[in-house]
Image (spheres, coloured by chain):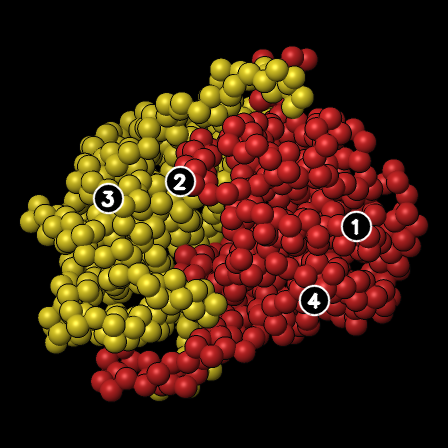
Chain colours: A red, B yellow
Amino acid sequence: MRVLFDNVNVDENEILSYSNKVKSIVDNLESRKDKDDDFVGWLNVGIDKSEIDRIKNTALKIRKQAEVLLVIGIGGSYLGARAVDSALSDKKLEIIYVGFNLCSNYIKSVIDYIKDKDFVINVISKSGTTTEVAIAFRIFREILESRYNDFKDRIYITTDSTKGALRNLANKCGYTSFVIPNNIGGRYSLLTAAQLLPIACSGVDIEKLINGAKEAYLKYRNLDVLNNECFRYAISRNILYNKNNFIEILSNYDLRLSYFSKWWQQLFGESEGKDNKGIFPVNLDFTTDLHSMGQYIQEGRRNLFETVIFVDCEDDLIIKHEEDDMDNINYLEGKSINYINKMAMQGTITAHFSADVSNFVILLDKLDEFELGSLIFFFEYSCAISSMLMNVNPFNQPGVEEYKRNMFKLLNKPGF
Amino acid sequence: MRVLFDNVNVDENEILSYSNKVKSIVDNLESRKDKDDDFVGWLNVGIDKSEIDRIKNTALKIRKQAEVLLVIGIGGSYLGARAVDSALSDKKLEIIYVGFNLCSNYIKSVIDYIKDKDFVINVISKSGTTTEVAIAFRIFREILESRYNDFKDRIYITTDSTKGALRNLANKCGYTSFVIPNNIGGRYSLLTAAQLLPIACSGVDIEKLINGAKEAYLKYRNLDVLNNECFRYAISRNILYNKNNFIEILSNYDLRLSYFSKWWQQLFGESEGKDNKGIFPVNLDFTTDLHSMGQYIQEGRRNLFETVIFVDCEDDLIIKHEEDDMDNINYLEGKSINYINKMAMQGTITAHFSADVSNFVILLDKLDEFELGSLIFFFEYSCAISSMLMNVNPFNQPGVEEYKRNMFKLLNKPGF
């Protein structure tokens, strides 16, 4: 992957002025990454080879065992897995996500859909008592237990190493289980056992995914901030933010990355959005959303910038000649759809930048495990640095409890 | 539907001070609605009974004729149909949307999917030469023509009444066709022949949908702005905007309305986002996005407000008792999922409002054609009024041409 800064309205000297700040943040993060009581463990990219093998073997078993894998999780225990699955799945095992909403209609549609399908469950939750997840697990576990004699062999639990409802259940019933690490928060847990089981089940090579992230970490150790794409992105975002750019749009041109955009939204929104600060992260899919939000980006309030993701892959879907050319697109004859998409991207970047909208451009040469792993780490690392440059703690989320407390009161939960 | 304003930080006297302005805007719109060379035709809600019957009969035919309806359209010729289809489809005919992107992988996946499916096409485009649409139509028409002898009976064209590539094609080949009205822009065309064919194909009663909108129009003629929910919403948005609330989140608690949110985003974004003005519209699905953007909304920059949509329907999916209660949700025993969802909504509104985030709350008693039609008109009308209060023209979109010009140049389109 490459990151281009040509269409970003930020001065190089201004970027350089952040060098010392970034160095001290990097030192700070490095000094914390081995601590068990902190949340910087993700900086030690990768997990034990033995755990990788256990995940891969379990995934192989599940892919033979069932037609459908129900993944039950929400937030940081959901978005990352779905992002990678959507981008790279080989589609040999159907993966359906539940437990990420309280939408009765959706849950019923899944109950109905799996009626005649052979399914297994992977429930992912640190506490095991998150409302959405607990409800979905109760519903689908009951179906599983009433349908299969070997139901114990069809429940896979991903949770805390020692405590919580799911750990107790796994111990009591002897379910296969995986461990969500203690020193990594949900939104930073994509490349850990917290989310790798469904990813492996989707046919993705999880070692290559991790290797992409590892390589990215090595690449981004360079303290020359102008030539370190990751640091330059983090710094430039802050400079733009300080110039009243309060919205960042992830402009994605490949529908396979739509869920990746949602993972990115959580990563940045939950990390930066506190203390009355933060860039508001929005995801749009182009070119489709150019036909809805393009007008605003071009001519609305000048308080936003974009980060563009484009996958520049080979494409054999070619526009053919048509005799009468009634639709006026014979001029595209012989061109691939992806090429046309790329010209749309380039034309859009020029148009938006000419209207004072800065555009970071991330180009992937292809969409595979290695590239995606690199991109994941790029965003994780730049997000941590960017948040700390903003003087907020990237690793907590104190604001998400408030609505839950209100909800528990309304639901007469004991203790609230 | 009802709109609640209890959690909106706007003073009633301030709302009243807009009365005269709103009256003159209403008069202005009313005086323009019958003009053929203006874009206010949507205010004459509904279409000819004979045209409704023709759409319904064509839909009945298509539902018998095929397994899959491919709808080819983008922007205003796509979002509305998909919104209503997603919300209310009876799922008897599969509808697949193409032509709304330049994502090669997506197009290939549809080509592959329909390989063994019996399909027909409805292409929707005023000009017939919109790049995404023209490309998709060329690709899928070729498949259709090579596969079926009766291909002429499998192409349904929705386009301009007299001119353009698709009108010429329809005339030349004798395809069944429907007319996109001249005096209604794409994003305001949901309740016209522009989008009603795929909606009728999804099993939706289009007359009831239109009736919901008609009733809403009658209801919202009241010039008492405090008691007219539609005007009050439009005015209050402006007041909030003038107090530095630059982002509006449509917080939707029912996944069936996810695409409706995207329709809403185009409606407001493209109508208001010009002259360096406009509220930036964002759509989130709750509760899932509370686990990603909840932190930002609660504690990030105080420059946003929310419009909440909740469908308060009957629900027979009930939480059951479990002996050991390891997941700690026995306290929810006997409660329906929708009730829990509602308490999540109420708890969230209280939490966000306590953090200075105003919340408009739209309650639907059920999700059916009538209610959805009312909601569509509520937003169309309030959007027009709100934009005009902002002194922008709600019915043009001058900014969407810029990227296209650049793209055409890059693609060597003749004339660019």
Disc 3 sits on a residue from what chain? B
Location of residue B258 with respect to B163 vertically, above or below: above
| Spot occupied by residue B199 in the image (x, y as percentages of width and height) | 25, 48
Tell me if mark 2 has few (under 14), some (14-19) or many (20+) residues whose alpha carbon lies within 10 angstroms of its own.
Answer: many
Q: Residues within 10 Å of mark 3 (few under 14, many from 20)?
A: some
The chain under label 2 reads B
Earlier sequence position, callout 4 versus callout 1: 1
Q: Are marks 3 and 2 on the same chain?
A: yes
Disc 2 vs disc 1: Cβ atoms closer than 8 Å? no
| Quadrant in the picture for the C terminus of chain A | top right
Q: Mark 1, chain letter? A: A
Q: Nearer the viewer, mark 3 or mark 2?
A: 3
Residue B164 against residue B15 in the figure, above or below = below
Q: Residue at point 61% right, 48% down?
A: A62
CA gap, disc 3 to disc 1? 50 Å
**Residue B50 location (% of width, % of height):** 6, 49
Q: Which residue is mark 2?
A: B256
Q: Are marks 4 and 1 in contact (CB under 8 Å)?
A: no
The residue at which mark 3 appears reads as B203
> Residue at the location (30% across, 37% down)?
B372
Q: SS for tag 1?
A: helix
Gap between marks 2 and 1 measured at Cα: 39 Å
Marks 4/2: CA–CA distance: 35 Å
Density class for disc 1 (Cα within 10 Å; few <14, some 14-19, many ≥20) is: some
Whether A331 is drawn above or below B321: the answer is below
Tell me the tag on residue A370: 4
Disc 1 marks which amino acid? Answer: Glu
Are the residues flagged by discs 3 and 2 in contact, CB closer than 8 Å?
Answer: no
At a point 26% along the width and 36% down the height, the residue shown is B369
Callout 3 and callout 4 share a chain: no
